[in-house]
Image: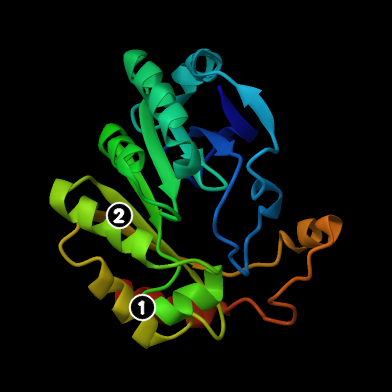
């Protein structure tokens, strides 16, 4: 059994094609811009079995088409790596594509096995600098570096993402550092995501002070300039 925060049945932003997105409960990071702080607690959500999730995904399989499938997100799905691996094995048995959306907030043998099992890793690179990574997430960049080393060795296809936040990642230097961080990895796509405030109401509902109060989302022009560096 695993603990699931919520399920989005027809997501179009978390991997290729239309996808069922399973948001797992629990996360070791405390990202200052997190839009799902209600997934942090490991004991939240509801208990679900791998068989239950696979059966639900099978009902939507005809909508997935050739590119769609199931994406495991969070929270940090690596906190429940063995459960997610069981889900992936069941889904693969039904011929369903599986993606893992992770910030690599932890790393161990179970996480490595899960990376190897999925068809695509969607890797959220919070920051490329150790000190800035800790300032932004409260965590240690070492787990991300271990995940990157594993991806470099296995050449698993990766979609890399970074949230562009004023005062943290919103600079040409940081985007160039991101590209250097990903050197040697089978990167199919790099996505720069503009910071937004859509999850602020959740922080307030949970009584957690919002750390980025007053920070504005980047403009379309600023995002275009940074995306030009990626291209």
Task: Quarter of the image for the N terminus: give it.
Answer: top right
Q: Which mark is residue 147?
A: 2
* Secondary structure at numbered mark 2: helix
User: Label 1 neighbourhood size at 10 Å, few (<14), some (14-19), many (20+)?
Assistant: many
Residue 148 horizontal/vertical position (percent) = 27, 58
Residue 16 horizontal/vertical position (percent):
39, 41
Residue picked out by circle 1: 175
The residue drawn where x is 66% and y is 57% is 35
Vertical order, 208 against 77 (above or below): below
Instruction: Please indicate whether residue 42 sits to the left or right of residue 186 in the image.
Output: right
Nearest to N terminus: mark 1 or mark 2: 2
Which quadrant of the view contains residue 123?
bottom left
Q: Please report the residue visible at 38 percent of the width from the left and 81 percent of the height from the top.
A: 174
The residue under the point 27% across, 70% down is 181
Question: From the viewer's perspective, is 131 left or right of 48?
Answer: left
Q: Quadrant of residue 9?
A: top right
Q: Does the rendering let one see residue 231? A: no
- Tell us which disc is closer to us: 1 or 2: 2
Specify the color scheme. rainbow
Q: CA distance from mark 1 to mark 2?
A: 19 Å
């Amino acid at each position: 059994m695993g603990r699931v925060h919520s399920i989005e049945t027809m997501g179009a932003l978390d991997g290729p094609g239309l996808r069922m997105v399973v948001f797992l409960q629990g996360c070791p990071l405390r990202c200052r811009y997190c839009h799902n702080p209600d997934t942090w607690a490991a004991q939240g959500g509801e208990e679900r079995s791998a068989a239950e999730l696979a059966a639900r995904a099978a009902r939507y399989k005809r909508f997935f088409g050739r590119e769609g499938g199931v994406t495991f997100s969070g929270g940090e799905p690596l906190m429940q790596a063995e459960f997610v691996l069981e889900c992936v094995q069941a889904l693969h048995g039904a011929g369903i594509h599986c993606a893992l959306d992770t910030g690599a907030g932890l790393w161990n043998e179970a996480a490595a096995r899960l990376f190897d099992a999925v068809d695509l890793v969607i890797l959220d690179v919070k920051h490329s600098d150790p000190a800035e990574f800790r300032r932004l997430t409260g965590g240690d960049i070492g787990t991300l570096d271990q995940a990157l080393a594993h991806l470099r060795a296995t050449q698993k296809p990766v979609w890399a993402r970074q949230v562009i936040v004023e005062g943290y990642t919103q600079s040409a230097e940081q985007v160039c550092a991101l590209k250097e961080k990903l050197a040697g990895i089978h990167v199919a796509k790099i996505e720069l995501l503009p910071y937004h405030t859509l999850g602020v109401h959740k922080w307030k509902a949970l009584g957690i002070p919002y750390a980025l109060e007053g920070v504005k989302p980047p403009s379309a022009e600023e995002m275009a300039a940074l995306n030009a560096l990626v291209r």
